[in-house]
Image (spheres, grey):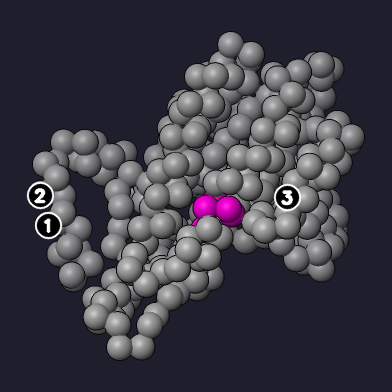
Amino acid sequence: MKRPGAPRHVLVTGAGSGIGRAVADRLARGGFEVVGTVRDPARAAALTEEARAAGVSLRYRPLRFGAGADLASCAAKLRSVGGPDIVVHNAGVGVFGPIEEVGADLVAEQFAVNLFGPLELTRLLLPALRERRGQVIWIGSLAGRISLPFQAHYSASKAAVAAISDAMRLELAPHGVRVSCVEPGDFATGFTDARTQFRRPGSPYGEAQARCLAEVERQERGAPPPDRVAAAVERLCRATRPAARVPVGQGARTMCLILRLLPDRVREIVVSRHYDL
């Protein structure tokens, strides 16, 4: 068991940019001992040096989810240095393209990074998390509550994240492990620029896909930075009874309520008009 008053150790996956970096930085400045993961070893070293120069307790280590990922080794190293008490899963990629044209390899990568890899790492860390009465925080998305055109695989992966979080919360509650899912709306994270865009020349979906992408990019350009998401994660880390799901963003809670109340046909019309389909 961790001694009372000792800093809690936090693992933040996908911490090199956007929401993950904002979360890692805020928690480190708030007194937590934070390890962030990024894909590239050189970037991990550079970010660690940057944090050291700033005087915050934040270290980065390389970790890739997907084919060939050595998650068992990563989990063993984390346990050997006394952590983590809290796992924040932010690592994610996005595939943008028509269901008919996006192949199985891209779909597999989408789920490997957004769900299967983080889930396996969590499974390997659960004995330690049980012992330390720890916490797991998943970064989902409002896209997991409403399937978006040309983002079916991303929406599906985030819906699966929320479902896993809900079930894990029930299973682990008797063992003192708290589980939550944060569901951000639109924030300026650069995620759109990094998204894998699948475009086939002469595709019958080409024009609609281009209009939809333009709207997604417009929304992100006008969105605020992810500070509110980082603040929501910190509140969960400090809460005695953290909420199961936490929608974050302008109008996020209202949108969740509307989605529950709207008939399916009305919802489809609203989404189709919004994305100019």
Q: CA distance from mark 2 to mark 3?
A: 42 Å
Q: Secondary structure at mark 1?
A: helix
Which quadrant: the N terminus?
top right
Task: Specify whether residue 8 is painted magenta.
Answer: no
| Residue shown at 78% from the left, 57% from the top | 62
Say what amino acid the circle numbered 3 marks: Gly
Which quadrant: the C terminus?
bottom left
In the image: residue 8, left or right of residue 142? right
Disc 1: which residue: 269
Report the magenta stretch's main SS: helix
**Depth check, front residue: 61 or 168:** 168
Rendered image quadrant of residue 79: top right
Within 10 Å of the Cα at label 3, are there few (<14), some (14-19), or many (20+) other Cα atoms? many
| Residue shown at 12% from the left, 57% from the top | 269
- Mark positioned earlier in the residue sequence (2 or 3): 3
Disc 2: which residue: 266
* The residue positioned farthest toward the right in the image shown: 80
Q: Which label number is shown at residue 36?
A: 3
| Residue shown at 50% from the left, 65% from the top | 106
* Above or below: residue 137 compared with residue 150: above
Q: Is residue 218 visible?
A: no
Q: Which residues are magenta?
A: 110-114
In the image: residue 193, left or right of residue 60? left
Residues tagged 1 and 2 counted as in contact (Cβ below 8 A)? yes
Residue 231 image offset from top left, x and y in percent: 54, 41
Say what amino acid the circle numbered 2 marks: Val
Rendered image quadrant of residue 276: bottom left
- Mark positioned earlier in the residue sequence (3 or 1): 3
